[in-house]
Amino acid sequence: MTPITIYHNPACGTSRNTLALIRNSGVEPIVIEYLKTPPDKAQLQQLLQAMGTGARALLRQKGTPYDELGLSDPKWTEVELMDFMVQHPILMNRPVVVTPIGTRLCRPSELVLDILPDPQLGAFAKEDGELVVDAQGKPGARAKPPNPASNARVSA
């Protein structure tokens, strides 16, 4: 079985909820705290390719040097944006989850349910108490339905 990997920031509630949903499917993922062990440029490029998106879609603005670096300017190329993320890992939005089904930025956290190979084992509520999975392990109380135009490439 191909392992599941999460690029995780333990200070982020969305990332913690996503990790908990993965574990609620009975899987202990590979956890990469990307601020301590950031992906190099080649790894970042592989993630973006697997997600089927460009670097701009993975940029995080809040709590980062995004504004100071002027990253909203369309002049920056894909390569330059990746270079910024390698130099400043906090610019990488999180959590990014890699499974055998697909790779996705899981914001909101319940988007991970679409790419987990195994069903949820039981009820799950987010840290704020919002119910995401019912007692039978079925995602019935999702906050938002999956967005088909979301930033994930899911294999058929």
Image: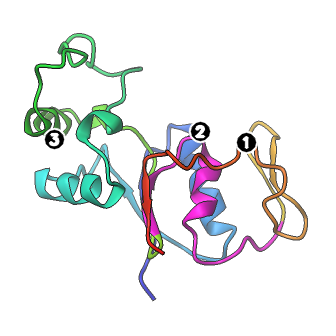
Q: Pointer 2: what residue?
A: 13
Disc 1 or 2, which lies upstream in sequence?
2
Q: Residue at x 77, y 74 (%)?
A: 121
Instruction: Count how many numbered circles sit on residues in the image.
Output: 3
Judge by depth and name the residue closer to the eye, 62 or 10.
62
**Which x, y percent locates residue 145?**
70, 47
Q: Pointer 3: what residue?
A: 86
Q: Residue at x 38, y 38 (%)?
A: 93
Q: Which mark is residue 144?
A: none
State which quadrant residue 122 falls in.
bottom right
**Is residue 97 visible from the viewing direction of this image?**
no
Q: Which mark is residue 127?
A: 1
**Is residue 57 visible from the viewing direction of this image?**
yes
What's the residue type where badge 3 is placed? Val
In this rendering, which labeled residue sits more in front, label 3 or label 1? Answer: 3
The Cα atoms of the two marked residues, 1 and 2, are separated by 7 Å
Magenta stretch: residue 147 in it? no
The Cα atoms of the two marked residues, 2 and 3, are separated by 23 Å
> Magenta segment range?
102-122
What's the residue type where badge 1 is placed? Glu
Q: Secondary structure at mark 1?
A: loop
**Which x, y percent locates residue 46?**
22, 60
- Indicate left or right for 138 with 150 as reference: right
